[in-house]
Image: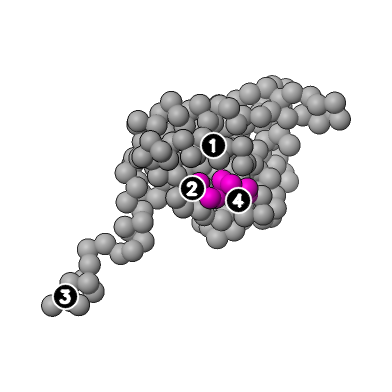
Amino acid sequence: MLNNLENDSIFSPEQVLENRGRVAIFIDGSNLFYAALQLGIEIDYTKLLCRLTGGSRLLRSFFYTGVDRTNEKQQGFLLWMRRNGYRVIAKDLVQLPDGSKKANLDVEIAVDMMALVDSYDTAVLVSGDGDLAYAVNSVSYRGVRVEVVSLRSMTSDSLINVSDRYIDLEAIKEDIQKTPRQSYPYRPLSGMGFLEDPRSSDGHLGIPE
């Protein structure tokens, strides 16, 4: 009888793992962009949101990125994100002495994780930045389960060590990448109230480097 009960368990091990309560998602846009380049894929952000939510109740999905206000393609991409399930937190890029531009949003991510800690049960952090390890450890002590999603080669061990679950982007890339479209070279306007996912001909989404 006991064996039969075990075999007829209501929940599979995967379903038990995914019983995460209310989920809040925090995405380091720049980190994800470079991870996608390493993997040689384009991220489908609708698929990504579904995969990270995993059927759980979603509190909110935050997308953090540096912005170039003169980059129209990037502005179009961020508008699409805002209208398709993401709360975008943008910060102006700062030019560094070597001529490159960068915006560090670690503080914003950490503050939001802490500010909302009583409103969610599971935090999904899409970043490999070890500077976020302290924030992850802090929310863990408040009883929150933390899942880190990133490319292993770009992920700090300190961040993995304080997480409850680590997911390598390599393992889920088939679930979150854009599939080649078999379509005509033009795209008609959508009548469904959603914006097309803007991209240049080479697939670049306008996220700053």
Callout in the foreground (3, 1): 1
Decide which of 187, 157 is in the foreground and name it: 157
User: SS for tag 3?
Assistant: helix
Residue 67 drawn above or below residue 2: above
Q: Where is residue 66 in the image (x, y as percent from the top left)?
A: 66, 29
User: SS for tag 1?
Assistant: helix
Is residue 91 on the magenta stretch? Answer: no
Q: Residues within 10 Å of mark 1 (few under 14, many from 20)?
A: some
Which disc is residue 163 wearing?
2
Residue 116 drawn above or below residue 171: above
Q: How crowded is mark 4: few (under 14 residues within 10 Å), some or many (20 or more)?
A: few
* Amino acid type of the residue that numbered disc 1 sits on in the rendered structure: Tyr
Q: Where is residue 203 in the image (x, y as percent from the top left)?
A: 69, 45
State the separation of the CA atoms marked 3 and 4: 41 Å
Determine the residue positioned at 13% across, 77% down. 1
Which disc is residue 134 wearing?
1
Looking at the image, tell me whether mark 3 or mark 2 is earlier in sequence order. Answer: 3
State the separation of the CA atoms marked 2 and 1: 11 Å
Question: Would residue 80 be seen by someone viewing this image from the given angle?
Answer: no
Could you tell me if the residues under marks 4 and 1 are in contact, i.e. CB atoms within 8 Å?
Answer: no
Looking at the image, tell me whether mark 2 or mark 4 is earlier in sequence order. Answer: 4
State the separation of the CA atoms marked 4 and 1: 13 Å
Which disc is residue 157 wearing?
4
Specify start and end residues of the magenta stretch as a single range: 155-163
Q: Quadrant of residue 197?
A: top right
* Amino acid type of the residue that numbered disc 4 sits on in the rendered structure: Asp
Determine the residue positioned at 61% across, 37% down. 131
Q: Quadrant of residue 58?
A: top left
Q: Mark 3 points at which residue?
A: 2
Q: Position of residue 184 (x, y in %)?
A: 63, 50
Decide which of 75, 192 is in the foreground and name it: 75
Looking at the image, tell me whether mark 4 or mark 1 is earlier in sequence order. Answer: 1
